[in-house]
Amino acid sequence: MEKYIIANWKMNPDDLVKAKSLLASVEIGLTDNDKKVVICPPVIFLRDLRQIVNKCQLGAQNAYFEKQGAFTGEISVGMLKDAGCDYVILGHSERRQYFGEADGAVNKKVLAVLASGMRPVVCLGEQERQAENIGEILKKQLTTILSGVAKQKLKEVVLVYEPIWAISTTPNSQPCLPDDALTVYLFLRKMLIQTYGQGAADKISILYGGSVGAKNAADYIQISQFNGFLVGSASLKSEEFIKIVKI
Ligand code: 13P
């Protein structure tokens, strides 16, 4: 499987000048070997950033599954591709919490993104720390969001485990212990193997997200075995983000 560091800028920074400057300062710290660094800015900045991006790839933070039509405020997968996207984050917990997205809609988006040739970066994770039924929650999410994905397409899916209670902007957030994250990593891998078989399941990248910074990135890679990160707040600080990439 491939290794990724994906920056989710969320609704930041607040203007294009700052967005260009942030991208430029990230790229200064990268080498040509840092290939799978994906920057997901607010969609309005995509076309301008495409003009200056050099070492990173670009992604969006959401997409709609219909091709075009009367869907006010939405942006289709084809439009994102046209704007220079290679990746689309789907099912982020903030989309679920603030915009009512459910697993069924996320699944339709996953299928639409795969059909377009871009890669979906699909998030799942439980709401509360030490939820008793975490296995059931994750199994249900995983089964629904990947429903209908053909075995040979699986390698194009990037899966992200983001426990919501560990996201830095969640009130009273707490970091997920690397050993606990390892348990979830192994659980997700096992479920993928059971569903798709070892060969196909081994090709899917599983990333971790939730308060990842330069201080804890090595633990999540070495102890928890994840294949990279989806980084929120720390991706807005170029020096720290570069350190995470190097780790
Ligand atoms: P933080 O890295 O700020 O915890 O955000 C995680 C996240 O939501 C990335 O999508």
Image (spheres, rainbow, N blue to C red):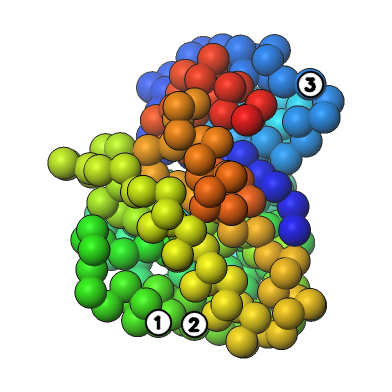
Query: Are dots 1 and 2 in contact, CB under 8 Å?
Result: yes
Compared across the picture, whether 117 is left or right of 78 comes to right
Above or below residue 56? Residue 75 is below
Q: Residues within 10 Å of mark 1 (few under 14, many from 20)?
A: few
Compared across the picture, whether 233 is left or right of 151 comes to left
Give whichever of 83, 222 is nearer the camera. 222
The residue positioned 72% from the left and 40% from the top of the image is 36
In the rendered structure, which amino acid carries the disc numbered 1? Lys
In the rendering, at what x and y percent does residue 209 appear? 45, 47
Q: Work out whether mark 2 precedes mark 3 in sequence or the reverse, and give the earlier one.
A: 3
- How far, Cα to Cα, is label 2 from label 3? 38 Å
Q: Which residue is mark 3?
A: 31
Q: Work out whether mark 1 precedes mark 3 in sequence or the reverse, and give the earlier one.
A: 3
In the rendering, at what x and y percent does residue 95 appear? 35, 56
Q: Which residue is mark 2?
A: 143
- Tell me: is circle 3 under 8 Å from ligand 1: no
Give whichever of 91, 31 is nearer the camera. 31
In the rendered structure, which amino acid carries the disc numbered 3? Thr
The residue positioned 60% from the left and 22% from the top of the image is 242
Q: Residues within 10 Å of mark 3 (few under 14, many from 20)?
A: few
In the rendered structure, which amino acid carries the disc numbered 2? Thr
Q: Residues within 10 Å of mark 2 (few under 14, many from 20)?
A: some
The residue positioned 25% from the left and 43% from the top of the image is 174
On residue 140, which mark appears? 1
In the rendering, at what x and y percent does residue 44 appear? 51, 34
